[in-house]
């Protein structure tokens, strides 16, 4: 009995250590789950943006109610990433509409902004737009909203809530918004 009593503190410490390990694993799983969930950054109830998606992410998008995927990344920008045809095939297999409006690093054009407006107005539910980091998708969405007359401060607020800064195009957003009113 005295031997067992001598080891009792070690058993308690070992049990506490196991609990701490379980808690760390639980916290780690929760963080991984949150990181996976946060890949799609919600701008508003109609659109989310994302860095490059995988074929598996198409299934996750479907589960979140996405009915349209807009690809703002040109093919070949990263040959290792799924290309437009790959994502389009996965989207169609999942019953999701797909549209490519590739934006290169040379900037945005009026036809691209108009295509985004048309896509968003024709969407039958939630839209997911993606590019390398989500920035070009956010900026294109911002320009489309501005052209429809949405206030630049509201656009900046929504983009900022999703973690994106529209400062590089803020003058264009304000000009388009003012021109639409």
Image (cartoon, rainbow, N blue to C red):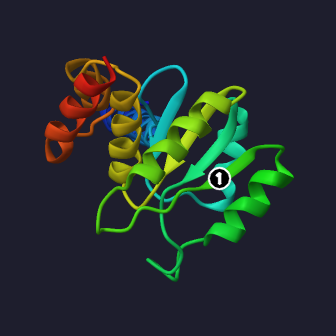
Q: Which quadrant does the N terminus fall into?
A: top left
> Does 35 sit left or right of 176 as displayed?
right
Q: Residues within 10 Å of mark 1 (few under 14, many from 20)?
A: some
The residue lying toward the viewer, choosing from 45 and 33, is 45
Q: Residue at x 61, y 72 (%)?
A: 83
Residue 75, percent from left and from top: 54, 75
Is label 1 in a helix, a strand or a loop?
strand
Residue 107, percent from left and from top: 30, 61
Q: Which quadrant does the C terminus fall into?
A: top left
Q: Residue at x 76, y 43 (%)?
A: 96
Residue named by callout 1: 99
Q: Residue at x 32, y 35 (%)?
A: 13
Above or below — where is 68 with respect to 132? above
Residue 24, percent from left and from top: 38, 39
Residue 5, percent from left and from top: 36, 30
> Does 173 sit left or right of 80 as displayed?
left
Tell me how many marks there are. 1
The residue lying toward the viewer, choosing from 43 and 101, is 101
Indicate the quadrant where residue 31 lies: top left
The residue lying toward the viewer, choosing from 141 and 44, is 141
Above or below — where is 29 with respect to 78? above
Q: Residue at x 26, y 18 (%)?
A: 151
Tell me if residue 2 can be seen.
no
> Does 180 sit left or right of 166 as displayed?
right
Above or below — where is 36 with respect to 54? above
Tell me if residue 168 can be seen.
yes
């Amino acid at each position: 009995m005295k031997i067992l009593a001598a080891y009792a503190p070690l058993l308690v410490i070992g049990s506490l250590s196991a609990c701490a390990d379980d808690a760390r694993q639980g916290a780690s799983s929760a963080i991984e789950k949150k990181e996976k969930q946060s890949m799609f950054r919600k701008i508003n109830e109609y659109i989310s943006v994302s860095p490059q998606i995988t074929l598996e992410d198409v299934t996750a998008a479907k589960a979140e109610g996405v009915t349209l995927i807009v690809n703002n990344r040109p093919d070949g920008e990263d040959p290792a990433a799924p290309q437009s045809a790959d994502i389009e095939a996965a989207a169609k297999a999942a019953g999701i509409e797909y549209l490519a409006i590739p934006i290169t690093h040379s900037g945005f054009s009026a036809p691209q902004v108009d295509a985004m407006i048309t896509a968003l107005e024709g969407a039958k539910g939630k839209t997911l737009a993606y590019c390398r980091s989500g920035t070009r998708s956010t900026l294109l969405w911002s320009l489309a909203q501005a052209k429809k007359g949405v206030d630049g401060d509201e656009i900046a607020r929504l983009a900022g809530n999703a973690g994106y800064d529209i400062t590089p195009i803020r003058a264009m957003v304000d000009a388009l918004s003012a021109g639409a009113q």
